[in-house]
Image (cartoon, grey):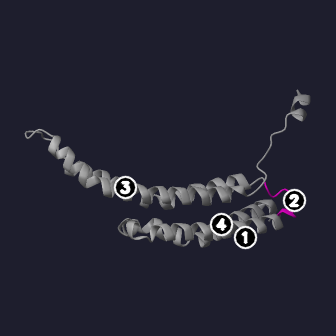
Amino acid sequence: MENYKSIIKVKKSQDFVGFFFVIAILLTATLFMLILNKVWGDVKTPLAEGLNSAMPADSSVNITRTLDQTSSGTLMFDKLMPFILIGLFAFVLIIAGSFMQHPIMIFVGIIIMAVAILLAVIYSNVYNSISSTTEFATTKANMGIQDKFMQYLPVIIFIMVIGVGSAIIYSRKGGSSSL
């Protein structure tokens, strides 16, 4: 039985690539929500008119109320942005836990932090340039939380990297068990 344990090795995560994943997911999710809300705003009025004209006169279905509830449902994703970020932070913390096997990896972590912050700046600018167009102006105004998160994405990623790095270094020292 011990021979099997020495042969089978579990490969652990090897780096902080999770930060790049987090930034890409945030950009993708925010752009998707921005476009979804814009398209829904454009389609809602013609859809309501078409459905109202197709409904029988004695129907008890209120199309306008139903479509208004759907509109508020798509805007609820804006309020979920902090929870998405917390979940992605936990993901990176779990994945990066096995990275710091050797102290030299701190320098690799610093390089990855610089690249992650650069990528966050680029993605923040891409989101800002897309959302600042006249077509998305009203949609951007309705999604204030998402807009703030994307505006401060480089700062959020910096804090995230520092938090993950600190947690890993703290856990390597043994935490409070060394007292």
- Name which residue lies at 62% across and 55% down: 90
Disc on the earlier residue, 2 or 1: 2
User: How many neighbours does mark 1 have within 10 angstroms: few (below 14), some (14-19), or many (20 or more)?
Assistant: some
Identify the secondary structure beneath mark 2.
loop
Image x and y of residue 63, in percent: 20, 47
Q: CA distance from mark 3 to mark 2?
A: 50 Å
Where 12 sits versus 26, above or below? above
Q: Indicate the amino acid at tag 1.
A: Ala
Label 2 vs label 4, nearer the camera: 4
Label 3 vs label 4, nearer the camera: 3
Q: Which residue is mark 2?
A: 102
Asked if residue 104 is among those painted magenta in the image, a careful observer would answer: yes
Q: Indicate the amino acid at tag 2.
A: His
Residue that sits furthest to the left in the current view: 58
Comparing 35 with 100, the one in front is 35
Q: Which residue is mark 3?
A: 39
Q: Which residue is mark 1?
A: 114
Q: CA distance from mark 2 to mark 4?
A: 26 Å
Residue 111: image quadrant is bottom right
Q: Is residue 143 left or right of residue 168?
A: left
User: How many neighbours does mark 2 have within 10 angstroms: few (below 14), some (14-19), or many (20 or more)?
Assistant: few
Image x and y of residue 126, in percent: 55, 67
Q: Is residue 148 visible?
A: yes
Identify the secondary structure beneath mark 4.
helix
Q: Is residue 140 visible?
A: no
Q: Which range is magenta? A: 99-105
Q: Which residue is mark 4?
A: 119
Q: Is residue 115 left or right of residue 87?
A: right
Disc on the earlier residue, 2 or 4: 2
